[in-house]
Image (cartoon, rainbow, N blue to C red):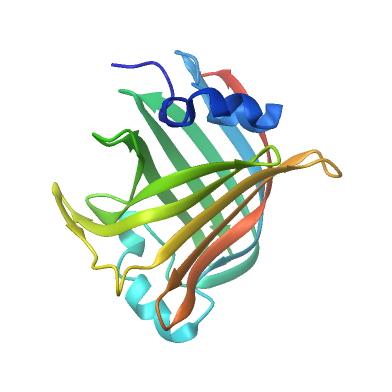
Amino acid sequence: MSRISPYERALGERIDQLHPTLRRYFSSVPEGHVGRGEGVFDATGAPRPWTRPLLALLQPFGAVYGGWGRDVPFRITNRLEGGRAVSERLFGFPRGEWTMRDSVGLNAHGRLVDEVGAPIGVVASFDLDVRDGGLRLTSRAVGIRIGRVRMRLPRFVSPVVTVNEGFDAASGRQRIRLTVDAPLVGRIYQYGGSFAYRIEEES
């Protein structure tokens, strides 16, 4: 299995255009090491109350949070397993902790694919764009995953997932913002905030 991060493989030489902090984040985590980060999400979840019961169906599987929170502390853990970038994000909501799990790899066309939640969850493929030292991911296709079965959503109902990763020089922290926008409806899910990140030996 490849020991090269799928982000490195998808970006190619463009990874050198990233801010050094982001370059380290998206590069391969060395064997025997793990990436860890702590921060706060300014806002996270479903901003429209009527969408929350539907999104809550995916919450037990670690895909999306079917609620809404502000100033939510979180921790992230990144590993490279079998050539895939595997992440866990632990959200500290007032009502209790919730863990989001995802696994990123490449499809047969070399495009980045993120599988969020298991065994039921969301699958999205992305186009990548490096801008001013940051990374922008825009979904090309979105689907639902049930076990090994994947069902691509038709374009007329498929939401657009956008992820912006950057570095804030004023605070010295990494910033992330994810938004999910559905046709005719608008914003149905989001999270965004800042965090500090390090790579250390796994104990």
Q: Is residue 98 left or right of residue 94?
A: left
| Residue 113 visible in the snapshot | yes
Location of residue 65 (image quadrant):
bottom left
Q: Quadrant of the N terminus?
A: top left
- Across and down, in percent, residue 74 comes to 59, 50
Q: Among all residues in the image, which is located at the extreme bottom? A: 50
Question: Residue at 51% across / 35% down in the picture?
Answer: 77
- Across and down, in percent, residue 110 comes to 32, 33
| Residue 198 visible in the snapshot | no
Q: Among all residues in the image, which is located at the extreme top? A: 31
In the rendered picture of this protein, how many numbered marks are placed on residues? 0
Question: Residue at 54% across / 23% down in the picture?
Answer: 13
Question: Residue at 80% across / 38% down in the picture?
Answer: 172
Q: Considering depth in this image, is 11 or 176 the residue closer to the camera?
A: 11
Q: Is residue 195 left or right of residue 160?
A: right
Q: Is residue 148 left or right of residue 167?
A: left
- Across and down, in percent, residue 187 comes to 50, 74
Residue 87, placed above or below residue 79 = below
Location of residue 47 (image quadrant):
bottom right
Question: Residue at 56% across / 29% down in the picture?
Answer: 14
Residue 74, placed above or below residue 142 = above
- Across and down, in percent, residue 44 comes to 57, 64
Q: Among all residues in the image, which is located at the extreme right? A: 170
Residue 177, placed above or below residue 134 = below
